[in-house]
Amino acid sequence: MATDAGSAGRRTRADDVTARIRQAIVDDALAPGARIRQEDIATMLGTSRIPVREALRQLQGEGLVVVVPHSGAHVAQLDLAELSELYTIREAIEPVAIGASAAAMSDEQLGHLRALYDRLSRIGPAAGEDWLEADRCFHLATFASARMPALLALIEGYWNRTQHHRRAYMRIIGSERRELIAVEHRLLMDALERRDANDAALLQALHVRRTRIAFAAPEPP
């Protein structure tokens, strides 16, 4: 029994360490390619290296960390081909999630989503990190009412893996593309408030597709 309790404790601690490292990667506190030193993370979080090692294995499975023998762990980097592949997958699966979510959304959930959208609109896409965080919260909330936990976990994982590229993209695009993003958000919100699953799915596919194409040509013609 003591062994089982200890194992449960280690799993809980490893989950916490995993969440902390994951958030540091998403927030760019750990940049792509950065070395992740187990001993430094363990000291910072006040834990042993065992949960850190377990966390790195979990994050490697999520595609956020690369562990190289005799070199250690590094934050994963995506090249343009990998990024395009992930966005192609997102373009296929996110419309499924948002369509299911639109059909199942309660009035309370819709009110929460409206509040997130209003905050996103007030901040505006020129605001950098604050807007990126608000945009992430809004989009993940548009999927959240879908009763598809495996799909939602997959979607959030892809968002985590592409967050750094979204951050870099928003730093270099011009006002015209920022305005287009805002229009797409407004149309998505309208479709969800109408609980129109088909429109929401079509708009989400368009939103992801346009971003995927724009990654290859970040400046408007």
Image (cartoon, helix red, strand yellow):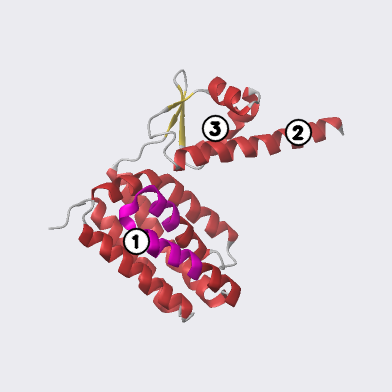
In the rendered view, does 81 fall on the left or right side of 5?
Answer: left
Secondary structure, mark 1, is helix
Q: In the image, residue 19 lies at what x, y percent?
A: 57, 41
Contact check, label 1 and label 3, Cβ < 8 Å: no
Indicate whether 58 appears above or below 151: above
Secondary structure, mark 2, is helix
Query: Could you give the CA–CA distance between mark 2 and mark 1, rounded to whole angstroms?
Result: 41 Å
Determine the residue positioned at 58% across, 34% down. Answer: 55
First in sequence, mark 2 or 1: give its number: 2
Residue at numbered disc 2: 7
Determine the residue positioned at 41% across, 51% down. Answer: 130
**Image quadrant in which you'd find residue 20:** top right
Query: Could you give the CA–CA distance between mark 2 and mark 3, rounded to whole angstroms?
Result: 17 Å
Query: Within 10 Å of the Cα at label 1, are there few (<14), some (14-19), or many (20+) other Cα atoms?
Result: some
Determine the residue positioned at 44% across, 33% down. Answer: 30
Query: Within 10 Å of the Cα at label 3, are there few (<14), some (14-19), or many (20+) other Cα atoms?
Result: many
In the rendered view, does 19 fall on the left or right side of 123?
Answer: right
**Image quadrant in which you'd find residue 110:** bottom right
Which quarter shows the N terminus?
Answer: top right
Indicate whether 39 appears above or below 162: above
Residue 24 highlighted magenta (yes or no): no
Q: Nearer the viewer, residue 5 or 108?
A: 108
- Read off the magenta span: 114-135
Look at label 2 and name its amino acid: Ser
Look at label 1 and name its amino acid: Val
Residue at numbered disc 1: 208
First in sequence, mark 2 or 3: give its number: 2
Residue at numbered disc 3: 56
